[in-house]
Image (cartoon, grey):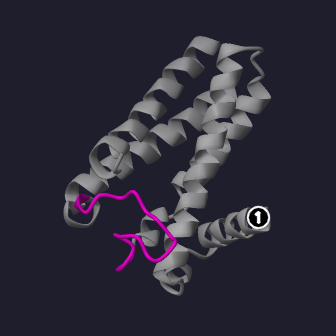
Amino acid sequence: MRKAVSLAALTLSLAIAGNAAAEQLSPEEQILTRQAGYSFMSWNMGKIKANLEGDFSQQQVAAAANAIAGIANSGMGALYGPGTDKDIGDVKTRVKPELFTEQEEVGKVARNFIQAANNMAEVASMAESQDDVKAAFGELGESCKACHDKFRKD
């Protein structure tokens, strides 16, 4: 648990400090930090899904959507520095080599994800209907899937 808390704190500090902080991290720390960010987003996606499938709480959905948008806008691209394209000792990564060579496509996928995350947060904050939230959540999920399909090993 202590490791997860420290990774979450590191992820938050990166969101605040930006690329300069990421450059000071070892490749292992960059991999672990980006994994912590993705795990946190995944957990929040699960919270939104649970609300859409059960008792809907606009407040919970908005909080989860804001957390996802915060990570999406934190500059996580800086955590894909040199040496983070492969496993390092016990630190494993599922990133495909194409993420480091297809920069134009990576940028397109990243921009789409950020746009979908921001839209999800905006829709969730207003949430006049659960259908609007479902549509935005579907778009966000598709933007996640696009990156997984192109740049993540199974």
Say which amino acid is labelled 1. Answer: Val
Residue at point 27%, 46% (across, down): 150
Q: In this view, does 119 lie above or below 54?
A: below
Identify whether 79 is placed above or below 110. below
Q: Where is residue 64 in the image (x, y as percent from the top left)?
A: 69, 39
Picture coordinates of residue 88 (x, y %)? 44, 76
Q: Looking at the rendering, in which quadrant would you find the C terminus? A: top left
For image coordinates 32% across by 47% down, the residue present is 109
Q: In this view, does 86 lie above or below 35?
A: below
Q: What stretch is highlighted in magenta?
A: 81-98
| Residue bearing the label numbered 1 | 5
In the rendered image, the quadrant that contains the N terminus is bottom right
Q: Which residue is drawn at 21% across and 58% down?
A: 104
Return the x and y of residue 145 as percentages of the image width and height.
38, 37
User: x, y percentage for residue 138?
Assistant: 47, 24
Left or right of residue 22: residue 126? right
Q: Is residue 82 magenta?
A: yes
In the rendered image, which quarter is residue 78 located in?
Answer: bottom left
